[in-house]
Image (tube, helix red, strand yellow):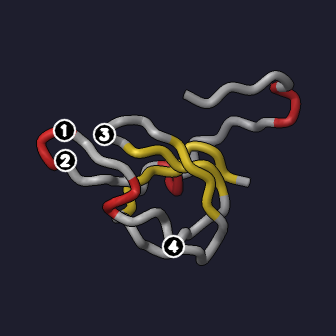
Amino acid sequence: MIYYKHGKYLNQTNDAKFDAIYEPGTATPYSGIYHCIVCQKEITSVHTHPLPPQNHHQHPAGQPIRWQMVVWG
């Protein structure tokens, strides 16, 4: 879960870029905060740097890590 104190620094959008799901190791398309859609673990990643790999953290029953952007900066 991501928290913030000063909402005046954030803008809500319905941009489709927030709907995409990314594989581990994919080049980060937009700098921001991403979360794993399975366990909700958050990470920050910078444009063109790879998203964390499959062995970044483990899920029960071998569920794969999948990243989705939640905050775009």
Earlier in the chain: of badge 3 and badge 4, it is 3
Task: Give the spatial CA distance, label 1 vs label 3.
Answer: 10 Å
> Residues under labels 4 and 1: Cα distance?
24 Å
The residues tagged by marks 3 and 4 sit, at their Cα atoms, a distance apart of: 19 Å
Q: Earlier in the sequence, mark 2 or mark 3?
A: 3
Disc 2 from disc 3: Cα separation? 8 Å
Residue at image mark 4: 50
User: The disc labelled 2 sits on which kind of residue?
Assistant: Gln
> In this figure, which residue is indicated by the disc labeled 1?
60
Q: Which callout, 4 or 1, points at the residue further toward the start of the chain? A: 4
Query: SS class of the residue under badge 4?
Result: loop
Is mark 4 in CB contact (under 8 Å) with mark 2?
Answer: no
- Say whether disc 1 or disc 3 marks the residue closer to the N-terminus: 3
Q: Residue at x 41, y 71 (%)?
A: 25
User: Quadrant of the image for the C terminus?
Assistant: bottom right
Whether residues under marks 2 and 3 lie with C-beta atoms below 8 angstroms apart, the answer is yes
Q: Quadrant of residue 21?
A: bottom left
Residue 55 point in image, percent of width and height: 33, 60
Mark 4 neighbour density, 10 Å: few (under 14) some (14–19) many (20 or more): some
Tell which circle, 4 or 2, labels the residue nearer the N-terminal end: 4
Q: Amino acid at mark 1?
A: Pro
